[in-house]
Amino acid sequence: MITKSIFMDWLACAKCAWLSRREPHRLVAGRVTAFDRMLARDGYAVEGVFRDWVASWPDAKDCEFQVVLSDEIFEARADMLRAAHGAGIDVFEVNIRLH
């Protein structure tokens, strides 16, 4: 299974990405920094605002958050999926920018 994170790791260091999948015990675990914790907190806060906004939609019941889609090779995580009633699904990735 190849995720975006694994792919990004591979772009940064192919050998490290290979080791993380084949022999993870040989890798030195990275330290979680204050910046990493801040990014995680911000991400959860943004998701909370987005969930509250989506709850006001008329079709909010058709929305599902943090959905993982996969086949035998790839895995993708969507911030939100919305059923399009016979026409497939809408995939959302949430990013907030200040103007």
Image (cartoon, helix red, strand yellow):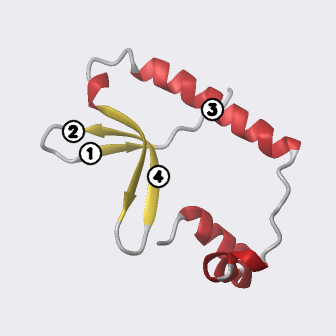
How far apart are labels 4 and 2 at the CA level? 18 Å
- Which corner quadrant of the image does residue 99 belong to? top right
| Residue at the spot of label 1 | 89
Q: Where is residue 43 in the image (x, y as percent from the top left)?
A: 65, 36
Whether pointer 2 and pointer 1 mark residues with C-beta atoms closer than 8 Å, the reply is: yes
* Mark number displayed over residue 77: 4
Reply above or below: 26 against 95: below
Tell which tag, 2 or 3, sits nearer the viewer: 3
Counting residues from the N terminus, which is met first, the one under dot 4 or under dot 2? 4
- Say what amino acid the circle numbered 1 marks: Ile
Q: Position of residue 26 (x, y in %)?
A: 77, 80
Q: Residue lying at the far left in this picture: please name it.
A: 86
Q: Residue at x 34, y 68 (%)?
A: 71
Q: Residue at x 82, y 61 (%)?
A: 30
Tell which tag, 1 or 4, sits nearer the viewer: 4
- Say what amino acid the circle numbered 2 marks: Ala
Horizontal side, residue 41 vs residue 71: left or right: right
Whether pointer 4 and pointer 2 mark residues with C-beta atoms closer than 8 Å, the reply is: no
| Residue at the spot of label 3 | 44
Helix or strand or loop: what does disc 1 sit on? strand
Foreground residue among 68 and 42: 68
Reply above or below: 19 against 88: below
Counting residues from the N terminus, which is met first, the one under dot 2 or under dot 3? 3
- Which corner quadrant of the image does residue 16 belong to? bottom right
Counting residues from the N terminus, which is met first, the one under dot 1 or under dot 4? 4
Reply above or below: 78 against 53: below
Counting residues from the N terminus, which is met first, the one under dot 3 or under dot 1? 3
Tell which tag, 4 or 2, sits nearer the viewer: 4
